[in-house]
Amino acid sequence: MSLPNTRVEDEQESLDELAELARTAGATVVDRFVQNRTRLDGKTYVGSGMVERIKAAAAIHEANLLIFDDDLRPAQGREIEEATEIKVIDRTELILDIFARRARTKVARAQVELAQLEYELPRLRRLWDHLQRLGGGIGTRGPGETQLESDRRNVRVRIKILKKILKGVEIDRQEQRKQRARMARVALVGYTNAGKSTVMNALSGADVLTEDLLFATLDATTRKLDLPGGHEALLTDTVGLIKKLPHHLVVSFHATLEEIADSDLLLHVVDASRTHCERYMDLADAVLKDMGIEEKPTRLIFNKIDLIEDVGELERLRRMYPGALFTNAVEGEGLEEIRRAICALVESKEEVLSITVPYSEGRLMSTVYQMGEVLSTQDGEEATEMKVRVSKADADRLRKLGVVG
């Protein structure tokens, strides 16, 4: 749907993305329609004339599914289905279906189920409209209405259970983050199918699923990353971003998205081989901003540079983004530059101190070893001289204890 002040480029990008989503879900796109209107049609969203055009095209192509790029009200979906005699879904339903297919862990399945139920709850009436015609009005409660209320109660109970489960997951992850607080945290973010999981696997040796489809992985995977100079960091692969990310998914995946918010550095992976790749970079930035994640240290990574056909385009990107990193993660090209960038972050969060620990302070000695990396030790007459690498927060703790030389 193209309304006044809508850019043609935005509309086409959104439809291209919808087509890619449909392909990911296993559908074949046979036709697409763009309509210019000054306002939406309250009954059918697109108006009766467009509905007839769609019905005729569906008959020609023998299509059995109609996907709308914008969310439809339940009544609008019902009207269009009755008029065209084919199944109608909107963008959110399509994305939820893909997520349901892709969810592999218990947590991901719970997140997706919660999003689905919260989306479907106000739409349950549509499923029972044919039964509601059997009765209605004051004192004539029909079987359809009875079943509808029963379904609503069941859905609300299930939503409550899922929220409790995910709240427990969120608390567990908060505890895990506290335990890992001394280590620098880096999150891979970016538009879906940019190659984040491939970068993750190449850097850390993880085995995150990679496919040439949208949302190949839904779960936030965290691995320890060994860096030059004996440094370490935690690297997290996150769910891919898309335009018009459904609100229900943002809410349901809150615990997962917190991994992004709590990171010290974002590595924004961009598929450099995509036409107008900078547009997808901007879309991902906009989604992060909508989620309240902005003004965080970020390094751009232009991935899949081996697939860029125009050498001039690669040189243009290098000139336009002098601080960016360029990689072909499949072949390992550019990985060392990424490691060095992460290492620079880690070093900025650490200090090397010379401390003196009296022999009588055995517990303090144990604490120092837990805090960070002991680089060297030398025993004296009454104390041990140590050189240690610790986080800035732990460095402050040691200064307060009066052991820093």
Image (tube, rainbow, N blue to C red):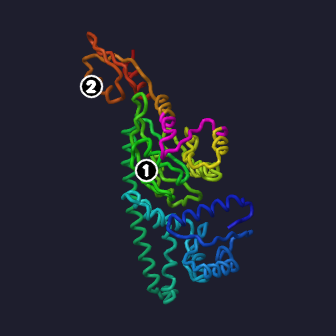
The answer to whether residue 293 shows anywhere in this view is: no
In the depicted structure, whether residue 76 falls above or below residue 358: below
Pinpoint residue 210: horizontal percent, then vertical percent.
Answer: 45, 54
Element at badge 2?
Answer: helix
Decide which of 161, 63 is in the foreground and name it.
Answer: 63
Q: Earlier in the sequence, mark 1 or mark 2?
A: 1
Q: Which mark is residue 48?
A: none
Pinpoint residue 97: horizontal percent, then vertical percent.
Answer: 48, 66
Q: Residues within 10 Å of mark 1 (few under 14, many from 20)?
A: many
| Relative horizontal placement of residue 294, taking residue 402 as reference (left or right) | right
Residue located 49% across and 90% down the image: 134
Residue located 74% across and 68% down the image: 38
Quarter of the image where the N terminus is located: bottom right
**Where does label 1 land, which residue?**
220
Pinpoint residue 89: horizontal percent, then vertical percent.
Answer: 55, 72
Q: Is residue 327 magenta?
A: yes
Magenta highlight range: 319-339
Residue located 52% across and 44% down the image: 328
Q: Residues within 10 Å of mark 2 (few under 14, many from 20)?
A: few
Residue located 51% across and 61% down the image: 248
**Which three-letter amino acid code belongs to the residue tagged 1?**
Ala
Pinpoint residue 117: horizontal percent, then vertical percent.
Answer: 45, 67
Q: Quadrant of residue 64?
A: bottom right
**Which three-letter amino acid code belongs to the residue tagged 2?**
Arg
The answer to whether residue 103 shows anywhere in this view is: yes
Residue depth check, mark 1 versus mark 2: number of the one nearer the observer: 1
Marks 1 and 2, how far apart at CA: 36 Å
**Where does label 2 land, which residue?**
363
